[in-house]
Image (spheres, rainbow, N blue to C red):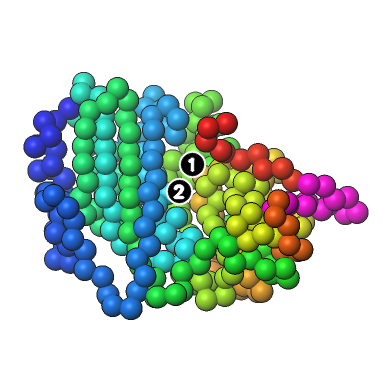
Amino acid sequence: MYPEKELIARIRGRFGEDRSLAGPGDDAAIVNLPEGVSLVLCSDLLVENTHFRRSLHPADSVGFKAVAANVSDVGAMGAEPAYFLLALAVPDDLDPSWIDLFFDGIDEACRRFGVRLAGGDSSTAERVFVDVAMAGHVPRDQAVGRHGAQPGDGVFVTGSLGSAMLGLQLLEDGIRDHPAVHRHLYPEPRHRLGQSVRSRASAMIDVSDGLSTDLAHILEASGTSARIDREAVPVAPEVDLTMALHGGEDFELIVTAADLPGEFEGIPITRIGEIIEPDPRGRILIVSGSSEQVLEPQGWQHFQ
């Protein structure tokens, strides 16, 4: 592992050139934002052996996903991601090559998503902890939350679901050369699509914990329920319906709106159901033919 002073110097040399901010390397970052905008802030923590395993996940994928998850959260508010802080804690005997590869992933995510590292902190720990806190911006009063879904709105999903969960299973089986594995390791958030539909959306969330769990978040916040057509759920290739309904880390978007276009920049947008009557329980009803039953959230939930 590098000494902290050398680590900071390496980070500044790689990510520090940006006239709109002061940092990394100072006590705090200063970012100049345009007038007439709302600041959107989020944070996402990746913990070794909870979110990733060093024996299984390449270091660059850990760095890439740490940024991508926050880009997805900002995009799910209809906002444009801009800057982020990185807190990194690693064992003091960690091979420096892991750090270098980790920052390769950070660098690739910065270039792919148009965001900048503004600063952060580092420490030692018994295992790897990666915390990214991201700032984005959106025109004032145009951010989209979870709480606006109304009866009569359609429920839409971008892309297809379940491949990230399949990718993890394949990776655990020793299979690496598969599109689903790549999607699990290097996800593609739909932040540009979120910005595109924000003026039409009543509520929006990204699929990080699974369709069943994340849609329930919208319904609970909005005090409504939803009816979903089982056959309309966009299931990814080689994936079964259970994975599509409950698998996490696809980083697609769930959007409620009166109407949306069928695609954005080649990404399909599928209407899978509708918001129905008010219901403080936030129930999801899944329909197949004449059969209707309650869909219980079975995606990822911490502390269970």
Whole-percent x, y for residue 127 in the image = 32, 25
Is 176 placed left or right of 200 in the picture? left
Residue at (8% x, 37% y) in the render: 5
- Dot 1, crowdedness within 10 Å: few (<14), some or many (≥20)? many
Q: Is residue 69 magenta?
A: no
Of the 4 image quadrants, the one containing the N terminus is top left
Report how many numbered discs are placed on residues in the image. Answer: 2
Amino acid type, residue under disc 2 in the picture: Pro
Residue situated furthest bottom in the rendering: 36
Q: Which residue is mark 2?
A: 187
Predominant secondary structure in magenta?
strand
- Dot 2, crowdedness within 10 Å: few (<14), some or many (≥20)? many
Q: Quadrant of residue 256?
A: bottom right
Whole-percent x, y for residue 273 in the image = 73, 61
Find numbered disc 1 in the image and state the secondary structure of the residue it sits on.
Answer: helix
Is 260 placed left or right of 173 in the picture? right
Q: Is residue 95 above or below residue 236?
A: above
